[in-house]
Image (cartoon, grey):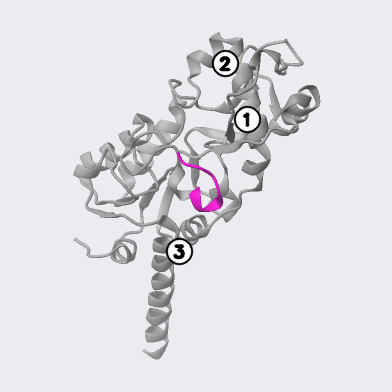
Amino acid sequence: MFSTLFDLFKNHNQVVVLTGAGVSTASGLPDYRDENGAWKHSRPMEYQDFISSQTSRRRYWARSALGRERFKAATPNKAHAALARLETLGKVSLLITQNVDQLHQRAGSRRVVALHGTLDQVVCLDCSARVTREKVQHYLMRNNPVLENITSIPAPDGEAQLEAIDFSQIEIPQCERCGGILKPDVVFYGESVPSQRVEACFDALDRADAMLIAGSSLMVYSGYRFARRAHENEIPIVAINRGVTRADDIFSMKIEQDCGPVLEEVVEALDSFNDDVSLEFRKS
């Protein structure tokens, strides 16, 4: 069918790309799982815990407040830039990302479905009012001086590892409109992805002629289902990921390397190929 990732992109023009946390690790953002698919950190916040427990919400917002500046400081890396270039070259029909960092959009990708939302907005679970994450950050730091001098270790999705404080003392914001619960506008574990996003991804896969999975173990069903759909549609599926994935048995090819250098090399090869074709055309 094809022998290299370059061949895949040379011969296919409707590639759906699915990315996970492994695409953003080179930008300094931690991922969730090791090469065996096991958790590197404590399990992320569960939706039911967040909505039912004030203690859980205090814990989440304290960790998020400490991780916020590192998260904001992250910039797109080679993988993000290469995927944006592949879209420009007419190769990527849709980029589905499980990441909430917006680094694909900042790198220039335009056909993006942020499957799990983004961290720049906060929503009220009672009245649906929205507020910027920056406004929430100002509130958290102004009302919780205990957080100012704490040294913490980065954790995935803009959080920080933080256990040795009394979370009952953390003051968290409420909705200014109705006093309701504020939640980051992202999909937590145990929460359903909005159906319109899922359908948009399935529609793109039903028109696709290939699929690329980059930096995802696919251990979570919200991403794995798209690999299954591609397999059912009998299109080639290539993965770039270090370590095991949930879909190893259905890949046409798997590249166990870091995403950035691999994708950058593909883009350079495609640009060179296109230049050669253009030169031959002018000669003729």
Q: Nearer the viewer, mark 1 or mark 3?
A: 1
Indicate the quadrant where residue 64 lies.
top right
Q: How crowded is the residue under tag 1: few (<14 C-alpha within 10 Å), some, or many (20+)?
A: many
Which numbered mark, 2 or 3, is in the foreground of this view?
Answer: 2
Magenta segment, which residues?
Answer: 25-31
Is residue 217 on the magenta stretch? no
- Kindly check if marks 2 and 3 are in contact, taking CB atoms under 8 A apart as contact: no
Q: Which residue is mark 1?
A: 64
Residue on which the image places disc 2: 56
Residue 170 x/y as whole percent: 70, 18
**Identity of the residue drawn at 46% across and 28% down:** 42
* Three-letter amino acid code of the residue under disc 2: Ser
What x and y, as percent, mark residue 38?
35, 35
Q: What's the residue type where badge 3 is placed? A: Leu
Q: Badge 3: how crowded within 10 Å, few (<14), some, or many (20+)?
A: some
Which residue was labeled with disc 3?
89
**N-term mark: 1 or 2:** 2
Type of amino acid at the residue the image marks with label 1: Ser
- The local crowd at label 2, few if under 14, some if 14 to 19, many if 20 or more residues have their Cα within 10 Å, is some
Quadrant position of the C terminus in the picture:
bottom left
Residue drawn 42% across the image and 87% down it: 282
